[in-house]
Image: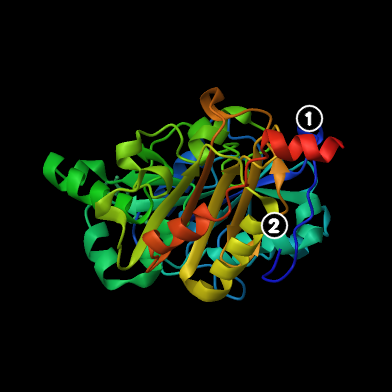
Amino acid sequence: MRTGEAPVTRIDDRSVDERIPITLLTGFLGAGKTTLVNRLLSAPDAGKIAVIVNEFGEIGIDGDLIARANEDMLELTNGCICCAAQGDLMDGLNRLFLRKTTGIADPSPLARLFYTDMKLDLTFRLDAVLTVVDLKHVIGQIARSPEAEKQIAIADKLIFNKRDLVDDAEFADAVAAVERLNPFSVKEVTTHGALPIDRLLDLDLFEPKRRDDMVGAWIGADQPASASGEAGDHAHDDHVHTPGVGAVCLQSREPLEWNALLRFFLDLAQEKGENLFRVKGMVHFQNVEKPVIFQGVQATFSPPTYAESWPRGEVETRIVVIGRDLDAAEMQARFAACIARRETVLDRGLGAI
Ligand SMILES: Nc1nc2c(ncn2[C@@H]2O[C@H](COP(=O)(O)OP(=O)(O)OP(=O)(O)O)[C@@H](O)[C@H]2O)c(=O)[nH]1
């Protein structure tokens, strides 16, 4: 959905999603992306993976660094996934790993493509945006680079790398600095990108549809409330005015009204523009039993889908908004206006007459 367009609700049949999963790997210069990809490709259970190393039109400077450890590995050094999808290149391929060469690249245009390019959407699904974080240097990178902030803000999973280079105090400071930008994403801590394949691929964290067990993690519902920087029902004073990049979590146990929430997001997308990075929501709508997954990257929203069940069985709307200079108090006030008005006994009685 682009700003101004109404989304179409669709119900997914998860059992028949045979699209090729794409993992988008991003992270600042030298964070450890190549190291991680090398490890991944050497894993005996890696299967057939294509690695697209570059952004469009760039020279493949990293190509030689990626060890051809596995004969099933396919590397597209100047690849465009749209073109690749048309050839036999993709035959038998079961995974595609997209590795951004440039450490300062913004991953959001590509993520948005999955909402807007229907041809791409037929063949591929974006599994997750993984952002590698250099624990040693991330605080300086956040201070100097808006792109570094954005890469962290948009991540579905943050991979804190180079644990060997920081002591416990530096580690805690770095994690705190990153969590201020994106408190809700799933996290891993590692050295030299040494993570098992099942913690990197097939996570279903970008737009959870296939794995209900990931929905709670996707929306940060598995994390303690004190770490979440919530607005909504439980606003914390220290998160009400967050300059720079930050997250606001809106929550409500009362059901919401569809049109009002839609208006809320259309207005937010219009007002914030480029400064709105990511929206992830699991919404309890009036007269709808199942949770509705509602999410977007910048002003582009995906069609809402249903999840099968509520995390921990708790029926509660939880929407995470990540962006720059968000006014949590104002957002909370507007969000409160989206709560559906209760039908009173009298109203129902009158309706029956
Ligand atoms: N000590 C230590 N060094 C690491 C770790 N991970 C990666 N490195 C080193 O950090 C340097 C950069 O790693 P790369 O994997 O090339 O990083 P990258 O993100 O691909 O770098 P760019 O392509 O420049 O963006 C290399 O010298 C790696 O060997 C780690 O966990 N600990």
- Nearest the viewer among 254 and 3 is 254
- Residue marked by disc 2: 259
* Residue 241 image position (x, y, % from top left): 30, 63
Query: What is the total number of numbered labels drawn onto the structure image?
Result: 2
- Residue marked by disc 1: 15
In screen coordinates, is 323 left or right of 145?
Answer: right
Any part of residue 46 in sight: yes
In this view, 123 is above or below 54: above
In screen coordinates, is 210 left or right of 282?
Answer: right
Question: Residue placed at 45% from the left, 68% from the top?
Answer: 102
Amino acid residing under circle 1: Ser
Question: Residue placed at 37% from the left, 60% from the top?
Answer: 329
* Residue 213 image position (x, y, % from top left): 57, 27
Asked whether mark 1 lies closer than 8 Å to ligand 1, one says no
Give the quadrant of the N terminus: bottom right
Any part of residue 17 in sight: no
Amino acid residing under circle 2: Asn
Label 2: state its secondary structure: helix
In this view, 194 is above or below 249: above
In this view, 287 is above or below 136: above
* Residue 336 image position (x, y, % from top left): 50, 53
